[in-house]
Image (cartoon, grey):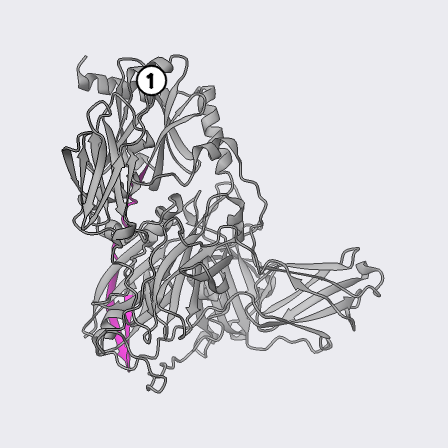
Amino acid sequence: MSKNTFFYFILMISNIVYSQEAIDDNRSKIISALENYFFLEREAIHLHLDKTTFLTHEKIWYQGYIINRKTKKPFFTTNVFVVLYDEKGKQVSEKLIYAYNGILSGVIDLDTKMPSGNYYIQVYTNWMNNFSEDESAIFKINIINPSEGIKNYKKADDDSLDLTLTPEGKSFVTGINNTIGIRVKDCRGNAPENLVATIQNSKGETLKSVNLNAAGFGKFEVNPEDDFDKVVLKHNDKTIVKTLPYKQSIGFGLEVNNFSFETKTIIKIKTNPATIESFKAQKAYLIVHQDSKHFIYDLVMDKNSLEQTISLQNTDLFSGINTIRIIDSNLKEWGNRLIYNAPKKETSISITKNYRKEDKIGFVGYSSTPNTSFSITIVPTETKSLNENYSILAGLGINPYIKESLPNANYYLFEPKRIKNYELDLFLLNQTAPKYDWENIKTTKPATNFSFDIGLTLKGNINKNVKNYSDYKVKITSFKDQIIKSTEINEKGEYTFENLILTDSTTLAMTLLKLPNFEAVDTKIGHQVLNRKKPFYNPFKPNTSQICPEIKAENTLADLDLPKFSSQAIQLEEIKVEKKLTYQRSIGNGHLMGYKVDEKMENIDLLSFIERNGFTVIRRFGEATIYSRVINTLNAERPTPQIIIDGRVLMNQFEFTTMRMSDFDEIYISSNALVPGMLNRSGIIKAYTKKNFKPNHIKEDPNNVLIKEAFSLYPFFKNADYKNTNNLGFDHFGLIEWASLLNSGEEGQFLFKITDYNKPTVKAIIEGMTQEGKLIHDEIIIEMK
């Protein structure tokens, strides 16, 4: 039989076995292990930062994106913790951020006295505590104190250089050609340039040489039966010697190539006669999976099948990281490998100049994806402030599945080429251990020990002198956050309010009401917020496996090498926009399209306005019902939007549909907003009436409670106080503009403004996510003149 005939025979047999409806017990056990381990939803979070190098006089602006890893769509997460650590692992700041529709936005304030150095932003939720793996997202940034100088963390430290050898598939098997990955790095992950590793025999003779790439990665092929003994690396005065890995007489070699062909991934499984002999009573399987999503191939185990090749179409693989494993019928793992399958690239964003008004230039962005959430950072084209090059494609498609985040992600993922795909594969090949260990997968099942928090929980008790608790209710009122709620009291005298969306320094008026007339009772009401301070059991910790020498800040910079700041500098006046929205930065509203109801809008029919903004209105016999245009299932009733007036959620639509446009001051609306719950809601309409709501018949509440640390308010962007922007310091490290909470709307258009700092061109880094979970990363040079 020719080699090609054998290859197609193996493929045919594998596909026949794969397509059979009857699944053997071994397959069932493998599938069950995957489904049990990944049964609970897992979140993936990415932060789009305005920069990655900051000065202590600046702020860190960010927009976050959250997906459900099962569906790859925006997740219902609301409570997100954003924590800043210094390089020693000491917490510097902590905030609770409200996420909505998979989007969050915020700012981290810096102290002008902070020392120069590397800092780390960790983003997590309480739900992530349910998993043994660290599911948080961590972002390394660099902060420069101008009075101290810059610490150069990019220079490799020769004394801490280390060389690691990782067999592809994690096994070094006798009798076959094995691919061995090489990685050289120092204690901070740096590698010197132009490294060459030599493979030597027992006599010290060089048999092969391997050129490592700029990141310190390489690979070579070797057979354990040949006289290969060690790998030697020489750099300056340092020599590193590593012996080849321990030889295994039984096992599998796993070789993967997904960079040579645009549309295919080739998997080779190699073994030896001793392995075939030991597998007489066993079966072996090739599993490709991403979390619980999977497909399985039977491996042929006979002496004529020492090497098997499987060709997969990339369209059949899962978008992002795929894990390949070889598992036997006893559920023992014999090899594993990570590969990256790039998602289809979305059409590039186009930007057109729209208008100029004083110091602002308006632009219109055009996207092929409607209803997409965007964030944009604008920096000088010569910027040096984006060293880490984080990308949403890596943040949500790669980093959640590996222990070590992909550094300089844009190099690999923005405008990918074959050589970049090869280098990305080298990075994945050299992962020394998988994040998701098979032994854990097959033996454990994560339990729901930690809650999936939606908002804050307020709990307390009332005075014990009150009798018959069922005759009373506790009411809370917050005019700042548009909250009016009441709840019952249990037999222990305790009350609970759940899912409260409260902002920092909110004052709650708490009242005890006696039924049936809801009379206010003078009494003390105790309270506590239960889920604000949630410990995270995988907090950021610096890598202490290697002790790095202390780096001193260099303060030998020329006068213009860093931006200058002055509190006395004349600030550019904020452009006063007519029809300014009062409630735009209230929690949740930043994700909706806001309208100020002026004299012209007052003449518009309210329901016609609702129809023009993506909803369907059915009018029958003088009444009207508003429906979403989104169809959730074939058989379910048509979903209706959640309607909120002055912070009060309406249980039915009658009140709203009988009102007039002139009754409202502002309306915020989105036909595609996700609404968690069991009421078949899709889309949101939030309206604020022109009259302040404050009932006169209720006495002043005797208990005013200040909630100091709740959800941080969405901030308005205000740039740092740069003294001069016409110098190299600003061009290298300054920020021109930051825009968050943008939405492309039904037509795929979004608007933003850039302050004119007298630069002929600027660089825009745009990231975004659609309602279907498609990810967008684009970089555009914008002409300002």
Q: Is residue 251 above or below residue 544?
A: above
Residue drawn where x is 55% and y is 50% of the image: 680
Give the amino acid type for the residue marked by disc 1 in the picture: Thr
Picture coordinates of residue 14, whole percent (x, y): 32, 21
Region rendered in magenta? 338-364
Picture coordinates of residue 445, whole percent (x, y): 53, 36
Picture coordinates of residue 237, whole percent (x, y): 19, 50
Which residue is the site of mark 1? 275
Question: Is residue 778 something one can see in this rendering?
Answer: yes
Q: Is residue 462 above or below residue 221?
A: below
Q: Is residue 299 left or right of residue 227?
A: right
Q: Is residue 138 magenta?
A: no
Image quadrant in which the C terminus is located: bottom left
Residue drawn where x is 19% and y is 35% of the image: 199
Picture coordinates of residue 749, whole percent (x, y): 32, 62
Image quadrant in which the N terminus is located: top left
Q: Is residue 306 above or below residue 604?
A: above
Q: Is residue 352 magenta?
A: yes
Magenta part, dominant SS: strand
Q: Dot 1 surroundings within 10 Å: few (below 14), some, or many (20 or more)?
A: some
Question: Is residue 257 something one can see in this rendering?
Answer: no
- How many numbered marks have been drawn onto this rendered protein structure? 1
Q: Callout 1: helix, strand or loop?
A: helix
In this view, the residue in front, 121 or 81, is 121
Q: Is residue 454 above or below residue 781?
A: above
